[in-house]
């Protein structure tokens, strides 16, 4: 029985299949369903867990090479939240939400959270 680290078996399975330059999406509760990629839904109630909480939990087990977020995230959220994401990610490339969504189908999988911060979705590319 696992006692530390990521305890969710589906997330563990997903993480173990990510290889060099593969992508993983961590999405908020409003992100659309993508039938072509595996989705692990861990929503419970509003903001439990959030995208940032999941990102922080995965970080010790995932070597992040690049990260993408929608440019709209900076426009629709408080500077404190934007700074927390900046602190959690080595480098973030911001692009229009429409372009961000074009990257999603190439991901190994998607973890859907209960996050309510607008445009807080992130695509992580493994190093």
Image (tube, helix red, strand yellow):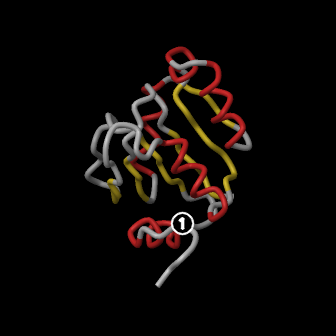
Q: Residue at x 50, y 53 (%)?
A: 24
Could you tell me residue 114's position as x and y percent?
37, 42
Examine the image and state in which quarter residue 45 appears. top left
Query: Residue at 32% across / 34% down in the picture?
Result: 30
Q: Residue at x 64, y 33 (%)?
A: 93
Helix, strand or loop status at disc 1: loop
Residue nearest the viewer, comparing 116 with 70: 116
Q: Position of residue 64 (x, y in %)?
A: 67, 53
User: x%, y% of residue 9?
Assistant: 41, 72
Most distant residue in the top direction: 75
Up-down relation of residue 40 to residue 55 (above or below): below
Q: In the figure, is residue 80 to the left or right of 32?
A: right
User: Is 63 drawn above or below residue 114 in the view shown?
Assistant: below
Closer-to-camera residue (76/78): 78
**Residue 113 against residue 4 in the figure, above or below:** above
Q: Pointer 1: residues within 10 angstroms few (<14), some, or many (20+)?
A: some
């Amino acid at each position: 029985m696992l006692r530390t680290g990521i305890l969710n078996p589906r997330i563990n399975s997903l993480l173990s299949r990510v290889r060099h330059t593969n992508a993983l999406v961590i999405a908020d509760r409003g992100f659309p369903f993508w039938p072509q990629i595996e989705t692990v839904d861990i929503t419970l109630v509003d903001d439990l867990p959030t995208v940032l909480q999941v990102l922080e939990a995965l970080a010790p087990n995932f070597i992040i090479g690049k990260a993408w977020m929608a440019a709209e995230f900076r426009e629709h959220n408080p500077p404190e939240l934007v700074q927390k994401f900046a602190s959690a990610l080595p480098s973030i490339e911001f692009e229009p939400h429409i372009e961000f969504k074009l990257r999603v189908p190439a991901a190994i999988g998607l973890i859907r959270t209960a996050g309510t911060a607008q445009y807080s979705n992130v695509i992580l590319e493994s190093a």
